[in-house]
Image (tube, rainbow, N blue to C red):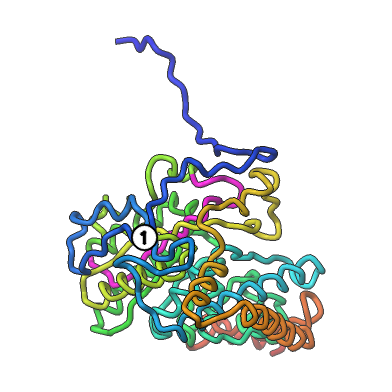
């Protein structure tokens, strides 16, 4: 039977373009404290609505409300706030360093600091994190040396990865930070496999992985969810929905059709959609998912709903594809200012303390910068050539040994 209507292809388009006024009226944001918190043993089928709502704890005035309030002690909250401020100061300096030609590439996480910094406080350093290039807050919150991060960015003689990775693709087994991959999506099945191995050995460590909204369209994402569901892997599968991939908005990856958290439902996994700019909500949802993983109840999908305030990277110009003022209009606000307002409301922080620590963070980063730049920036200093033969195998292969000798090392 002949089709009487001409077919047409749907190509997703963002609601606004450069030159337009930012418009977020389409967003349906439930009130803080309005989403129920199920027991960790609740079957995934019975909590489907959590994939479509939005877990929020902080009200606009800064009060923490509702069943997801994790009731974190003020000292931990101050630690989280300081980590976010330090991460932002680090980003600002490294961005300027790239513009000055001291490194080839950098990626900021402005507006997304609550994601990594809150989750780093929930997970232990023995749990293995499989991040993207926008979770530098994991290392910073855990106290990884800032100068060492800069050495890797500069690819200098003290680069801990010996020049084998692009800038911002850190790696530290000691800090539970798996090597970042430039091939987007690969960290998801790696995290699931690591978690399965931990469970198979009867260990007590869990894994966590992060992926952007755009990379959820990769096949690795779906393979990982299949294995995580079938084998009940003790892993937290984070989707950082910051609205934009490098230059395409989340609709290209399916974000207009449904939430990204909803993808977990098809695999029988609990899926929570979380206000990613609400430090307390991120902390609470991660704590819930971690407890579930540690109780042999399997994986959880978390969609962390946030906004990429800065450009994708130093090679990107967001003014070419979105309104210039859009970041300022994001209705879920700035995660740093929101947590600061909460602490001030508790009487555990002040505007004066905030300004003082902002300056202290800048000084910490400046001191680390001087230490790293004394060794050298891009092209001024590099790892020893002989190190190219190292770290390929635990015990160096005989062919590498021969090549090393032939090269005169």
The picture places residue 287, in percent across and down from the top left corner, at 34, 74
User: Magenta residues?
Assistant: 231-250
Q: Is residue 388 visible?
A: no
* Image: 286 above or below 127: above
Q: Is residue 287 visible?
A: yes
The picture places residue 161, in percent across and down from the top left corner, at 61, 80
Q: Which residue appears at 36% of the width and 67% of the height?
A: 65
Q: Which residue appears at 65% of the width and 38% of the height?
A: 20
In which image quadrant can residue 56 be found? bottom left
In which image quadrant can residue 3 be found? top left
The picture places residue 72, in percent across and down from the top left corner, at 39, 80
Viewport quadrant of the N terminus:
top left
Viewport quadrant of the C terminus:
bottom right
Left or right, 257 with respect to 85, comes to: left
* Image: 396 above or below 163: below
* Magenta stretch holds residue 246: yes
SS class, disc 1: loop
* Image: 345 above or below 257: below
In which image quadrant can residue 272 be found? bottom left
The foreground one among 287 and 124 is 287
Q: For mark 1, does the 10 Å Cα neighbourhood hold few (<14), some (14 to 19), or many (20 or more) residues?
A: many
Residue under circle 1? 55
Left or right, 202 with respect to 395, comes to: left
The foreground one among 34 and 309 is 34
* Image: 252 above or below 144: above
The number of numbered discs placed on residues in the rendered structure image is: 1
- Judged by its main secondary structure, the magenta piece is loop
* Magenta stretch holds residue 177: no
Q: Which residue appears at 43% of the width and 68% of the height?
A: 63
The foreground one among 291 and 347 is 347
The picture places residue 209, in percent across and down from the top left corner, at 42, 68
Left or right, 89 with respect to 279, comes to: right
């Amino acid at each position: 039977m002949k089709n009487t209507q001409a077919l047409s292809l749907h190509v997703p388009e963002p609601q606004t373009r450069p030159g337009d006024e930012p418009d977020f009226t389409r967003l349906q944001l439930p009130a803080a404290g309005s989403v129920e918190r199920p027991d960790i043993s609740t079957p995934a089928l019975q909590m489907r609505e959590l994939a479509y709502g939005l877990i929020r704890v902080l009200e606009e005035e800064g009060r923490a409300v509702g069943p997801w309030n994790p009731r974190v002690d003020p000292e931990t909250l101050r630690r989280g706030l300081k980590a976010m401020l330090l991460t932002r100061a680090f980003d600002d300096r490294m961005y300027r360093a790239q513009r000055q030609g001291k490194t080839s590439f950098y990626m900021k996480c402005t507006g997304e600091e609550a994601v990594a910094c809150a989750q780093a406080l929930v997970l232990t350093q023995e749990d293995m994190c499989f991040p993207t290039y926008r979770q530098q807050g994991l290392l910073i919150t855990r106290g990884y040396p800032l100068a060492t991060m800069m050495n890797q960015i500069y690819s200098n003689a003290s680069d801990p990865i010996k020049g084998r990775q692009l800038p911002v693709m850190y790696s530290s087994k000691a800090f539970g930070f798996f090597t970042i991959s430039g091939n987007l999506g690969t960290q998801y099945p790696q995290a699931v496999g690591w978690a399965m191995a931990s469970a198979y050995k009867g260990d007590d460590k869990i894994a966590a992985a992060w992926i952007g909204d755009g990379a959820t369209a990769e096949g690795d994402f779906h393979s990982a969810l299949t294995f995580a569901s079938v084998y009940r892997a003790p892993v937290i599968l984070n989707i950082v929905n910051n609205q934009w991939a490098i230059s395409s908005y989340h609709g290209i990856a399916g974000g207009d059709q449904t939430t990204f958290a909803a993808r977990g439902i098809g695999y029988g996994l609990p899926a929570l959609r979380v206000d990613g700019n609400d430090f307390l909500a991120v902390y609470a949802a991660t704590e819930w998912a971690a407890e579930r993983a540690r109780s042999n109840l399997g994986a959880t999908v978390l969609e962390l709903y946030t906004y990429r305030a800065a450009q994708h990277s130093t090679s990107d110009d967001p003014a070419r594809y979105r309104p210039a003022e859009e970041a300022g209009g994001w209705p879920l606000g700035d995660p740093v200012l929101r947590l600061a307002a909460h602490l001030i409301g508790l009487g555990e922080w002040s505007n004066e303390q905030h300004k003082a620590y902002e300056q202290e963070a800048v000084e910490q980063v400046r001191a680390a910068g001087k230490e790293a730049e004394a060794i050298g920036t891009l092209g001024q200093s590099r790892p020893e050539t002989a190190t190219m033969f190292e770290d390929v195998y635990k015990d160096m292969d005989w062919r590498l040994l021969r090549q090393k000798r032939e090269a005169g090392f």
